[in-house]
Image (spheres, grey):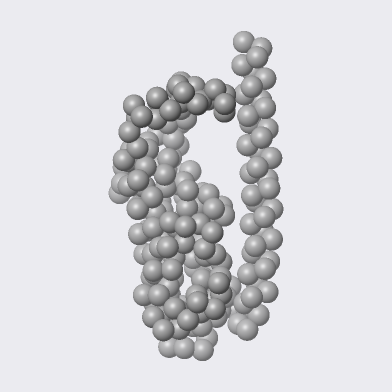
């Protein structure tokens, strides 16, 4: 996968970075770590400017995020409720739980969108519940822009600093990603266990 990413950035420059990052937001398996650190590395050996690369990466992130957000807004509430009534028992999920989650997101969605931009895979998927909760689109774009700008700038600057060792940097970032995802998985499992235990007592 690295080869075609290198080819696109090498041939299309800033626009290539923007398009790749937009695509990464829609299809999370595409590695943003590779795209961003490689972009930073290439600022050392081409005419690309590190700040302009960061801005284009952030624009790409926002484009991808607003597409997923828009899909979330298209989710029909009644269809979702019918699905929960039919299949929700498998996941111990009730309509009331979804409404509570939506209410929580309405109250805390701003900061959630911001911090989730630093979490692997989740940083792409968080746009969906934001759209489903009908979060104000301008507020969504503001927190998305700030969060992704921080994330993008850190990785691009690290890539520039690492130079020819950028691939080793990607491996270290991937290790961080696995640790974060592992912690999240444990947290989700514990939360489901705790909720189920509380419901059994009531």
Against 150, residue 66 (above or below) is: above
Q: Is residue 148 visible?
A: no
Decide if residue 194 is on the left or right side of residue 105: right
Percent across and percent down for residue 58 are 41, 64
Residue located 36% across and 29% down the image: 79
Residue at far top of view: 202
Percent across and percent down for residue 86 are 46, 23
Q: Quadrant of residue 134?
A: top left
Residue located 48% across and 43% down the image: 112
User: How many circles with numbers are drawn on the protein?
Assistant: 0
Percent across and percent down for residue 127 are 42, 47
Residue located 63% across and 57% down the image: 177
Residue located 40% across and 24% down the image: 82
Q: Quadrant of residue 59?
A: bottom left
Q: Nearer the viewer, residue 153 or 193?
A: 193
Against 180, residue 50 (above or below) is: below
Position of the N terminus, as image quadrant, is bottom right
Against 125, residue 17 (above or below) is: below
Position of the C terminus, as image quadrant, is top right
Percent across and percent down for residue 92 are 57, 24
């Amino acid at each position: 996968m690295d080869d075609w990413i290198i080819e696109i950035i090498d041939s299309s420059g800033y626009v290539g970075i923007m398009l790749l990052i937009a695509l990464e937001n829609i299809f999370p398996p595409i590695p943003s770590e590779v795209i961003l650190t490689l972009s930073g590395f290439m600022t050392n050996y081409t005419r690309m400017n590190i700040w302009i690369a960061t801005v284009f990466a952030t624009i790409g992130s926002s484009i991808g995020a607003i597409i997923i957000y828009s899909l979330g807004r298209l989710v029909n509430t009644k269809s979702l409720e019918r699905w929960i009534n039919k299949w929700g028992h498998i996941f111990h999920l009730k309509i009331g739980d979804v409404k509570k989650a939506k209410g929580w997101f309405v109250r805390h969605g701003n900061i959630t969108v911001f911090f989730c931009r630093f979490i692997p895979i989740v940083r792409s998927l968080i746009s969906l519940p934001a759209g489903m909760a009908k979060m104000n689109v301008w507020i969504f774009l503001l927190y998305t822009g700030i969060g992704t700008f921080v994330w993008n700038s850190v990785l691009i600057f690290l890539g520039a600093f690492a130079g020819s060792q950028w691939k080793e940097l990607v491996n270290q970032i991937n290790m961080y990603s696995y640790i974060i995802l592992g912690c999240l998985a444990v947290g989700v499992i514990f939360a489901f266990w705790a909720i189920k235990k509380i419901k059994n007592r009531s």
